Image (tube, rainbow, N blue to C red):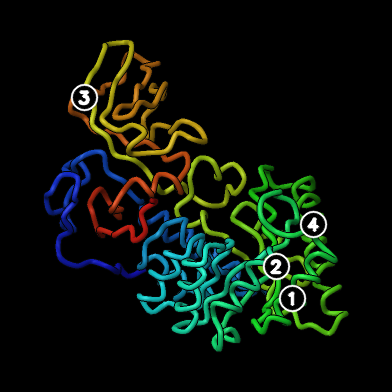
Amino acid sequence: MPTKGIGPPEVDPKVRIAISPGTEVKELPTPALLMDLDGMERNLLRMANFFRDSGPKLRPHFKAHQVLSLARRQLEVGAIGLTCARLDQAETLVRSGIDNILIANEITEAIKIQHFVDLARRAPVIVAVDNPKVISDMARLAGEWKHELNVLVDVDVRLGRCGVKPGEAALSLAKLVLERGLKFRGLMGYEGQVALSPGPEKDQVVHEALKRLIDTKAMIEREGICVEIVSCGGTSDFSIAAKYPGVTEIQAGSYLLMDCTYSPFAPEFELTLTILATVISKTPAERLVVDAGFRAMSGENGLPSIKGISGLRVKALHIEHTVIEITDPSVGIEVGDKIEMSVHFLDQTLGLHSHLYGIRRGEVEEVLKIEVVAQ
């Protein structure tokens, strides 16, 4: 796959030095966020090949990488558009020329609704709704432009987070969308990360959730209302959800980079994201300490794992340090050496960095800007 996104050297704001393509990994200032380009490309094509012959299409989540060049690569191999978690992510994509966007989250404040209205005048962005007042506020604030607002009714099918109840509640909201003059495009139902290995139990959990969504679709259609879009699914269950009759698009995102949290539930995809750190202290036969902690990676879902070196085990994350237990005294790691740790939770980790280094054969091939850093 051809390399993209290589330009002038990027200045890492944390160390204020230029990092150019061709820089060896061992020369990078730490901590640094690395992406294995070969693994990422295999993940990209593996998912694209699945959807090439599938009825539903892929609408990957931008928050899973927050890099414009990676979003474009997903579109180039068949994705129909992007999913966003926030309005500012949608704004970033529209400014870059990507306009087939779903904001899979509720917008409630007047200032954000107005922002969405302005954005909808520039691109056919879709937003999820689950509240009658928000629908009325959208229509009021949009005025003569309300017919430009594309809306999906969010249905709570399993997760117990956002969304109205399946059935009558969703039907009532769909009718209100039309009554207020907005564009009702269909339904969204996120069944949540299915923390089960592939097998019959996982199939059953996903099918039960999606049945609620598709039964709701049928109820709305019996009222003569067109349900064009049924958006659902994620990396952990994409292959199950994509085969369920009535589903039109899947929102998988983590598959591209992957992390240790998701990996057991989507084993067909490779871990590609690591934190490069430098050993700054060693107590022989006891522990190492490296210069990357909570400010470089998330420990919310669990501790990272050491990549490619046996005899070491991450014991604890501190603000600026990771403490690593030496379980094999013969491991030849010394102060000044660099190690990589596989990221346990990619979404939160991405928000801690401004750049992502694409690595191939031990060298930086691309320096990728992370466009939307968590507030």
Residue 360 appears in the picture as rendered: no
N-terminal label among 4 and 3: 4
Name the residue that disc number 4 marks: 207
Quadrant in which residue 107 is drawn:
bottom right
Name the residue that disc number 2 marks: 132
Give yes or no for contact between labels 2 and 3 (Cβ–Cβ under 8 Å): no
Question: As drawn, is 309 to the left or to the right of 63?
Answer: left
N-terminal label among 4 and 2: 2
In space, the residues marked 4 and 1 are separated at their CA atoms by: 28 Å
Give x and y (percent) for residue 116: 49, 73
N-terminal label among 1 and 2: 2
**Badge 2 density bin: few <14, some 14–19, many ≥20, Cα 10 Å:** some
Give x and y (percent) for residue 102: 55, 70
Q: Nearer the viewer, residue 35 or 187?
A: 187
Residue at image point 44% right, 45% down? 348
Q: Nearer the viewer, residue 305 or 333?
A: 305
Q: Nearer the viewer, mark 4 or mark 2?
A: 2
Give x and y (percent) for residue 52: 59, 74
Please tell me whether residue 137 is drawn above or below residue 31 in the rendered image. Answer: below
Question: As drawn, is 46 to the left or to the right of 131?
Answer: left
Secondary structure found at label 4: helix
Give yes or no for contact between labels 1 and 2 (Cβ–Cβ under 8 Å): yes
Name the residue that disc number 1 marks: 176
Tell me which amino acid carries mark 1.
Leu
Name the residue that disc number 3 marks: 280
Secondary structure found at label 3: strand
**Badge 4 density bin: few <14, some 14–19, many ≥20, Cα 10 Å:** some
Tell me which amino acid carries mark 3.
Ile
In space, the residues marked 2 and 3 are separated at their CA atoms by: 56 Å
Give x and y (percent) for residue 205: 78, 49
Tell me which amino acid carries mark 4.
His
Secondary structure found at label 2: helix
